[in-house]
Image: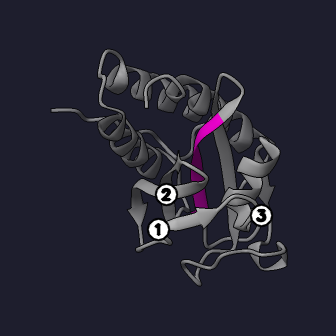
Amino acid sequence: MYDFSADPELPKTELYRQLHAAADALTAGEPDGVANMANVAALMWEFLPDLNWAGFYRMIEDELVLGPFIGRPACIRIPIGRGVCGAAVESGETQLVEDVHAFPGHIACDAASRSELVVPLRRNGRTVAVIDLDSPTPARFDADDAAGIGALAELMTNRI
């Protein structure tokens, strides 16, 4: 049995260090990318406070396709360049959005979402997936969150 949990009162750097260590322990040596994404989605949900969605979208051909996640049902397919996730793929860069309602072309899968963090997972110069986090709190995510999820994305890039 796995029992990974963290104190949400920890400083963010320590919280993300523990999340990274847990993700590494769960995914090391496991060749099934879907299983790894599912476990990491569950870890993000357990470790990170104030989320209403945590998970992955996978690049399949020329669009993002829903992967393992925790939260309300979500959009299944997202075109490149559309919404926050599509913008992350198009730019190849992390998208840190304080107010999703002010983001041009935002896709509202859950009307409760107010802020979003999307980090691309890139392999050989190409985006293979994104990690997507949503929160019902405006400006929930900051540079520390982007760095912490960025390190997690680097770990997961070759494990999915």
Spatial distance from mark 1 to mark 2, Cα to Cα? 6 Å
Which residue is most to the front? 61
Question: Which numbered tag is attached to residue 76?
Answer: 1
Spatial distance from mark 2 to mark 3, Cα to Cα? 26 Å
Residue at 34% over, 40% down: 34
Helix, strand or loop at label 1? It is: loop
Tell me: 24 left or right of 126: left
Is there any visible trace of residue 93 in the rendered image? yes
Image quadrant in which you'd find residue 138? bottom right
Which is nearer the eye, 61 or 110?
61
Measured from the top left, where is residue 66 in percent x and y?
46, 59
Residue at 36% over, 34% down: 33
> Is residue 43 shown in magenta?
no
Stretch in magenta: 127-134
What residue type is disc 1 on?
Answer: Ile
Give the mark toward the camera: 1 or 3. Answer: 1
Q: Main secondary structure of the magenta part?
A: strand
Question: Which numbered tag is attached to residue 38?
Answer: none
Image quadrant in which you'd find residue 112? bottom right
Is there any visible trace of residue 140 in the rendered image? no
Looking at the picture, does residue 8 appear above or below residue 19? below
* Residue count near mark 1 (Cα–Cα under 10 Å), binned few <14, some 14–19, many ≥20: few
Which is nearer the eye, 127 or 20?
127
* Residue count near mark 3 (Cα–Cα under 10 Å), binned few <14, some 14–19, many ≥20: some
Total count of labels: 3
* Residue count near mark 2 (Cα–Cα under 10 Å), binned few <14, some 14–19, many ≥20: some
Image quadrant in which you'd find residue 121? top right
Residue identified by numbered label 2: 65
Measured from the top left, where is residue 3 in percent x and y?
25, 35
Residue identified by numbered label 3: 139
Helix, strand or loop at label 2? It is: strand
